[in-house]
Amino acid sequence: MTTQELIAQIREKKSFLCIGLDVDINKIPKHLLAEEDPIFAFNKAIIDATHHLCVAYKPNTAFYEAYGIKGWQSLEKTINYLNKTYPKIFTIADAKRGDIGNTSTMYAKAFFEDLAFDSVTVAPYMGKDSVEPFLNFTNKHTIMLALTSNKGAFDFQTKEIDQKELYKHVLETSKTWENSENLMYVVGATKADYFKEIRKIVPHAFLLVPGVGAQGGSLQDVCKYGLNDTIGLLINSSRGIIYASKELDFAEKAAEKARELQKEMENLL
């Protein structure tokens, strides 16, 4: 998917909502456990109920890998269903990969070619040659961790080096890499005060923003400094939407939560 196609979807739906499909089998409605593939059954119901309210879905691969080959098959069914049934939806493999060249190339092939995701999250700690292999794929997007929403982000990301925070060095350096126009960045909603500084460095890039909802991030605060001329934000909510109910009406309740966020986004736009 091209960036322009993503922007078109945002404007059409008046939404920049991304729904995280982080499926814990212990939290899904009990009646689904009788299904052949409970995880996929849960995802399919959530997707069918919310696809008109969001522009992206983001499965965190850890929640699938934890169940071995069956979990990976559930992930494959989920992405295949999205690509076949809702091809205009932007898909994110939240895998946080990143390794030296040959390994990163294989990771990229796994998510971009085999599973056909539109994007994948990567960690930049190993530098240029761990990220550039992901950037070589046409109309695919690499979403690099910049400033995350967890408490541990302050351990390294905000430490000053040469009188500048590390995350700023990461953002500035990444812009010099080959095909850097294919980069997006993860910036946590719980770090809303930092968005003004981040936009000075990457004014045009899309930012994937976790932390709204269950983690306490404010949509209003993020948009105050994060929005740009092309919207430039994908706001992720996972638990706050997909676990809105454990009853038979779980998909409808998820849609209600998604609609609340979509309406708030529509007003902000």
Image: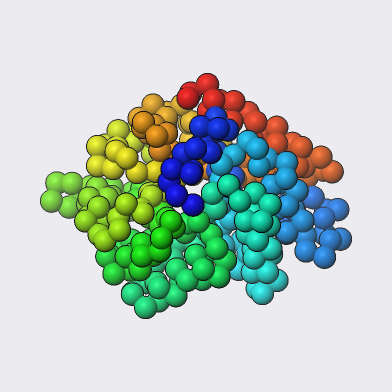
Q: Is residue 148 left or right of residue 213?
A: left
Q: Where is residue 136 in the image (x, y as percent from the top left)?
A: 36, 65
Q: Is residue 86 left or right of residue 12?
A: right
One can see residue 148 in this view:
no
155 is higher (above) or lower (below) than 136: above
Q: Where is residue 116 in the image (x, y as percent from the top left)?
A: 55, 63
Quarter-wise, where is residue 115 in the image? bottom right
Name the colour scheme.
rainbow
Q: In this view, does 97 lie to the left or right of 46?
A: left
One can see residue 13 in this view:
yes
Q: Position of residue 101 (x, y in %)?
A: 33, 75
Q: Where is residue 265 in the image (x, y as percent from the top left)?
A: 53, 28
Q: Which of 49 and 170 is in front in this view?
A: 49
Q: How many labels does the image show?
A: 0
Q: Which residue is pictured at 41% across the width and 60% down the height?
A: 138
Quarter-wise, where is residue 230 in the image? top left
127 is higher (above) or lower (below) than 54: below
Quarter-wise, where is residue 221 in the image? top left
Q: Which residue is pictured at 63% across the width and 59% down the height?
A: 79
Q: Is residue 81 left or right of residue 134?
A: right
Q: Which residue is pictured at 68% across the width and 40% down the height?
A: 50
